[in-house]
Amino acid sequence: MEDKKVKGRLQSPEERVKNFNEVEFGFNDEEAKQEADRCLHCMNPQCVKGCPVNIMIPEFIQCIKEGDIKGAYDVITRSSSLPAICGRVCPQEKQCESKCIKGIKGDAISIGSLERYVADQAIINNFNVSKKVEKNGKKVAIVGSGPAGLTCAGDLAKAGFDVTIFEILHKAGGVLTYGIPEFRLPKAIVEKEVESLKKLGVRINTNVPIGNAITIPELQEQYDAVFVGTGAGLPKFMGIPGEDANEVFSANEILTRINLMGAYKDDSKTPIKHLKKAYVIGGGNVAMDAVRSLKRLGIDAHLMYRRSEEELPARKMEVEHAKDEGIIFDVLTNPVRILTDENNSVIGMEVVNMVLGEPGEDGRRSVNEDESSLHKVDCDMVVMALGTSPNHEALKNSDIELSDRGLIVVEGTKTSLDNVYAGGDAVTGAATVILAMEAGKKAAQEIIDKLK
């Protein structure tokens, strides 16, 4: 008999499209225990090898089996500073869960859901992992408070360093705060995780534009080491005619206005127009976040992706949730022109059908336009969710080396500047939260090795 995982409870699609509350409710005590009991506690746990931050997964699951939730939290936080976040947004199905032996003949253990359960219980019961650490007299500056910066700060604080984070926005969290919708990652959860770091002694200075208010060379003079985790927040566009229309947005702007500025609220100072029909162009998690957010604003929301549905890069779970919510998927379709009226407002798009070719070196099939298929679709809003690239404003007046792609060049995590390290999307290009955390951990360890 196939071994099935415990299915988590969700808001119904009919209800959740009317609000921005979290879609998944998370495990209760009974569900968590039932799912934990499925774990085989392997002697050679492959799941740990699949975790970028190497959480001792069987160990924390065993604690759940025994009812020791504080013990489980202690195990997780030895490796991760952001468990409540990772349990919600990390692509476990491609990482730890993909290595789970249970997945060979049934369902893999729901590792992410169990991690979320433990972290949520820690918040509810106010578990405290901060321990008195003898300070070593060394100071480190962190530029950016996204997942890479927060992780690096947490590991350094636990090792006795005096850590200060500099964040350009008025709230800490980076993409966790401005980029991921409330229905996937409540901002109260991000704030709780940030508060946990503050309890470790990490200072967070917001509204500080590094590169302008203070430069990297000036930080080098004041601190023993600097970590740059500025992410990749510069949106990409297609370069097609009509992109300068009034109702063409980047997914970054839509999500920032909703998440950071409350644009979905009736009393918002930066509301998003309640237009009738929108197309979000792209197929990744950001595209899925944007199109599902627009649906919650009462907009007829479509997702347009140039490849097939099987090749959507977004998490399978997010695709399923979007379909349940009534998002319309227009796959194997791509825009070539945005149509506007005399006021430069969007009235539609010219699009073509796409034909899949042979797989390339990266395994993805090539796509080609069927020019004979040119046709028009009506809409009054277009959102580009085509990926992002680093914005290096923070690197002004520094000679840090960049690659041809505009990424920070590192050896390990060390940059070309003395005692300056970097990691996350600013180094790799846009990637996942957990990979940014992995980079933050590696940088922290390199800083520890160098300064201690």
Image: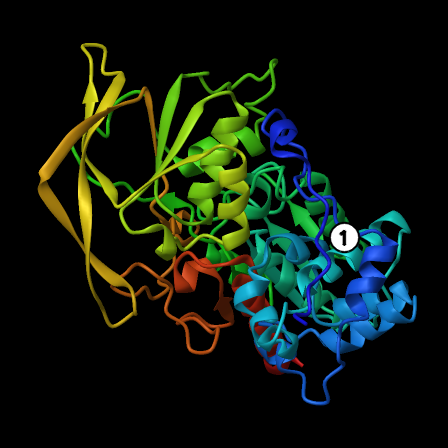
How far from the left and from the top, in percent, is residue 153?
66, 62
The quadrant of the rendering that contains the C terminus is bottom right
Residue at 73% over, 89% down: 43
For the view shown, which residue lies furthest in the front direction?
1
For mark 1, what is the residue? 198
Residue at 61% over, 43% down: 184
Amino acid at the residue labelled 1: Lys
2 or 412, which lies in front? 2
Q: Residues within 10 Å of mark 1 (few under 14, many from 20)?
A: some
373 or 25, which lies in front? 373
Colouring style: rainbow
425 or 224, which lies in front? 425
Instruction: Note whether 49 is above or below 112 in the view shown.
Output: below
Asked which secondary structure carries label 1, the reply is helix
Q: Is residue 52 left or right of residue 231?
A: right
Instruction: Note whether 44 is above or below 385 in the view shown.
Output: below
How far from the left and from the top, in percent, is residue 233?
42, 46
Q: Quadrant of residue 286?
A: top left
The quadrant of the rendering that contains the N terminus is bottom right
Is residue 311 something one can see in this rendering? yes
